[in-house]
Image (cartoon, rainbow, N blue to C red):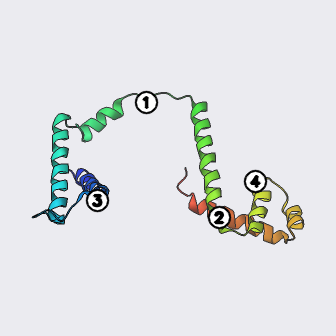
Amino acid sequence: MQPNDAADIVQDVFQRVLSHLDDFHRCQPGESFRGWVYRIARNRTLDHFRQSKRQPNAVGGSDANDRIQELPQPEVPEEESNECATASRRLVLRQGVELIRNDFDPKTWTAFLRTAVEGHNSAEVAEELGMTKDAVRQAKCRILRRLRKDLAWLP
């Protein structure tokens, strides 16, 4: 049995034990909790082997991978590919921004939005929010640094 299959069976056994815990009755003679769990695990393992006999074994390895790599890649127009990537990136950025929003003071957040997103001058944002120009620039830098750190995995 493959380790991934064993892990799936263990998880399934835990799920079944939890969902059928009310079905276990200790009052039956000779019935132990350990025996009950053992029967569930045994039956789930047997089910796995029965299912695997019905399904053909997958062929894999480096030869199969080499053959897959030889297949022609579907052509996606470059414009469409770039548009999808850009839209996906925007969505992830928007969600990343929303996730960190509550980690910052509302005034700091407003300064960031007004300068980095809306493109306003730091001097006018500073005057509007009652902050110094340096504080506005620092707010923008702190939030952008955090976004870069949290979303570093993005291409």
Of the residues under marks 4 and 3, which one precedes in the sequence?
3
Q: Residues within 10 Å of mark 2 (few under 14, many from 20)?
A: few
- For label 1, the crowd category at 10 Å Cα-Cα, with few meaning under 14, some 14 to 19 and many 20 or more, is few
Badge 3 amino acid: Asp
Residue found at x 18% / y 45%: 47
Q: Residue 145, which numbered label?
A: 2
The residue singled out by tag 4 in the image is 117
Label 2 vs 3, first from the N-terminus:
3
Residue positioned 16% across, 59% down in the render? 38
90 above or below 20?
A: above
Give the distance between the C-alpha atoms of the residues marked 4 and 2, in whole angstroms: 15 Å
Going from N to C along the chain, the mark reached first, 3 or 1, is 3
Q: Which residue is mark 1?
A: 73
Task: Measure the C-alpha gap from mark 1 to mark 4.
Answer: 38 Å
Using residue 29 as the reference point, say whether residue 111 is left or right of it: right
Q: Position of residue 93 (x, y in %)?
A: 62, 52
Q: Is residue 148 above or below residue 131?
A: above
Q: Is residue 28 visible?
A: yes
Across and down, in percent, residue 58 comes to 23, 37
What's under tag 4, amino acid-wise? Val
141 horizontally vs 115: left or right = left
Q: Are marks 2 and 1 in contact (CB under 8 Å)?
A: no
In the structure shown, which secondary structural element does the residue marked by tag 3 occupy?
Answer: helix
Using residue 135 as the reference point, say whether residue 141 is left or right of it.
Answer: left
Say which amino acid is labelled 1: Gln
Disc ID at residue 44? none
Of the two numbered discs 2 and 1 in the rendering, the one whose residue sits closer to the viewer: 2
* Tag 3 residue: 22
To which quarter of the image does residue 111 belong? bottom right
CA distance for labels 3 and 1: 53 Å
**Label 4 or label 2, whichever comes before in sequence order:** 4
